[in-house]
Amino acid sequence: MIRSIVKYGDPVLTRKAAPVADVTPEIQQLIDDMVETMYAAPGIGLAAPQVGVPLRVCVIDVSGGRKGGEVIALINPEFVERTGMQLEEEGCLSVPGHNATVARPERAIVSGLNRAGTPITVEGTGLLARALQHEIDHLDGTLFLNRLRGVPRDIIVRKIKKQQRSGAW
Ligand SMILES: [Zn+2]
């Protein structure tokens, strides 16, 4: 089932999400819905708070679903290691239409549980490393806008506020 994606301004996006205690069928359904929602958007990553669920769950497919079987589902993800630095343009399904260049570590290793509840470790460089960090940020209530320096962030926030006032957000 495709769920609706909440946008910047919704308080669920700024709260720290709670760890998942048990990988129940409800959590697995949430993951399946998130994958469907991510592909439909379309996007390459989605965190549970973005569908209004304040739990530490995210899904990533840097191919955007173009190649089969590449989706990564992570429950309670934690960074094991982050190294290097990359500077690339980034966007967010909860901040549609507003991209910006964000500095992130070039490589990330993350551990967590997969959809079956089995411990896994995911290692990514480049776009995958960026997606892992963007989605885990969501679980901590952080948007990519919070990673920008003052002026670029202020410009985007001002444009969004204008859209909100006109009812276009
Ligand atoms: Zn996002």
Image (cartoon, rainbow, N blue to C red):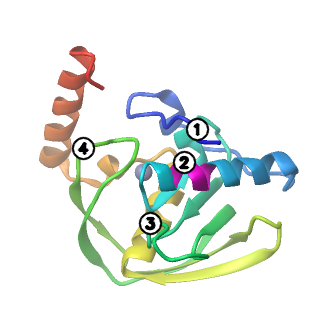
What amino acid is at disc 2?
Thr
Indicate the amino acid at tag 4: Gly
Label 3 Cα crowd, 10 Å radius (few <14 / some 14-19 / many 20+): some
Residue 7 % position (x, y): 41, 34
Task: Identify the amino acid type marked 1.
Answer: Arg
Question: Which residue is under mark 2?
Answer: 37
Residues 13 and 2: in front is 2
- Which quadrant holds the N terminus? top right
The overriding secondary structure of the stretch rendered in magenta is helix
Q: Secondary structure at mark 2?
A: helix
Look at the numbered discs 1 and 3 and tell me whether their residues touch, using CB distance below 8 Å.
Answer: no
Query: Which residue is labeled 1 in the image?
Result: 3
Residue with the mark numbered 3 = 64
* Dot 2 or dot 4, earlier in sequence: 2
Q: Secondary structure at mark 1?
A: loop
Q: Is mark 2 within 8 Å of ligand 1?
A: no
Q: Which residues are magenta?
A: 34-38
Q: CA distance from mark 2 to mark 3?
A: 11 Å
Badge 4 or badge 3: first in the primary sequence: 3
**Residue beneath the point at 53% across and 59% down:** 136
Question: Which quarter shows the C terminus?
Answer: top left
Q: Is residue 15 above or below residue 62?
A: above
Callouts 1 and 2 close, C-beta under 8 Å: yes
